[in-house]
Amino acid sequence: MPAKRIAIVTGANRGIGLEIARQLMANDAFVVAGCRNAAKCETALAALRRGGDNVAAIELDVTDTRNVRRFVDAVARAHGAPAILVNNAGVFPEERGSKVTENSTAYWRMTFETNLFGAMRMCREVVPLMLPLRHGRIVNVSSGLGQMSKMEAGTPAYRVSKAALNALTITLAAEVKGTGILVNSMTPGWVRTDMGGESAPRSVEEGADTAVWLSLLPSSGPTGQFFRDRQPIPW
């Protein structure tokens, strides 16, 4: 395992993703920020380099399989095998009062392409690089809206995509059990970001904390679980 852990954070140019990257840098990880385009990469670098030079930014579109492969290959060639993957990239385009009967199939596909398949693509490319390290931490940024035990009406495509992301977490954790790779989901809560809005009660620092904690778990840490504020919660 490299002396400095290599961490990938998707959707890292703003909000919770940017803060996760910043906190990982402060914990001596070398962070590769995945951002949708060159301009967003430059924005992320300008913000993150205030905290040190242990950061790079590479264009990443998690909805594009070939782009994901190029991104992960570029990370491995330039910096080494990643020990941490935070699947933070996500979309929440629905109105909160929307219904299953109102959203088109294309709309559901668009939501799933980022929130579920984007994370799946990243895991598919990164896990083989983690296996030789015998060490890996995968954190899927989910949502309380995807919590099956508290599922309600409203924003169905988003809710179901995050519930599916949680199922991916459980499945992958079981597949890699005993390899040194720990896989968990977390919910940041309602956070003051472009997605959460100004009325949200939580800061980005609070929203990012559990994801960073899961990224830095010891080998004895949990896997295949769902967390809020560093505490396990029901699926």
Image: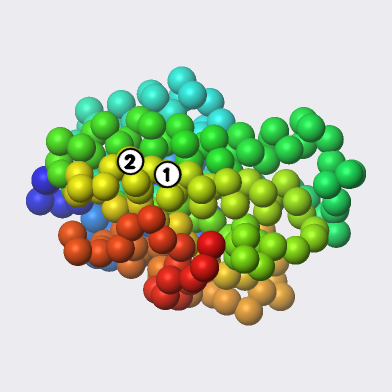
Residue 147 image point, x, y percent: 60, 62
Cα distance, mark 1 to mark 2? 6 Å
Residue 84 image point, x, y percent: 29, 49
Displayed quadrant of residue 81: top left
Q: Specify the label residue 171 is tagged with.
A: 1
Secondary structure under tag 1 reads helix
Q: Which residue is mark 2?
A: 175
Q: What's under tag 1, amino acid-wise?
A: Thr
At a point 49% along the width and 71% down the height, the residue shown is: 233
Mark 1 Cα-neighbour bin, 10 Å: few <14, some 14–19, many ≥20: few
Q: Contact, CB < 8 Å: mark 1 with mark 2?
A: yes
In this rendering, the answer to whether 187 lies above or below 5 is: below
Residue 188 image point, x, y percent: 52, 67
Which of the two residues, 152 or 136, is positioned nearer the viewer here?
Answer: 152
Q: What's under tag 2, amino acid-wise?
A: Glu
At a point 45% along the width and 32% down the height, the residue shown is: 121
**Image quarter hosting the N terminus:** top left
In this rendering, the answer to whether 14 lies above or below 149 is: above
Secondary structure under tag 2 reads helix
Mark 2 Cα-neighbour bin, 10 Å: few <14, some 14–19, many ≥20: few
In this rendering, the answer to whether 159 lies above or below 57 is: below
Q: Residue furthest bottom?
A: 201
Residue 198 image point, x, y percent: 69, 71
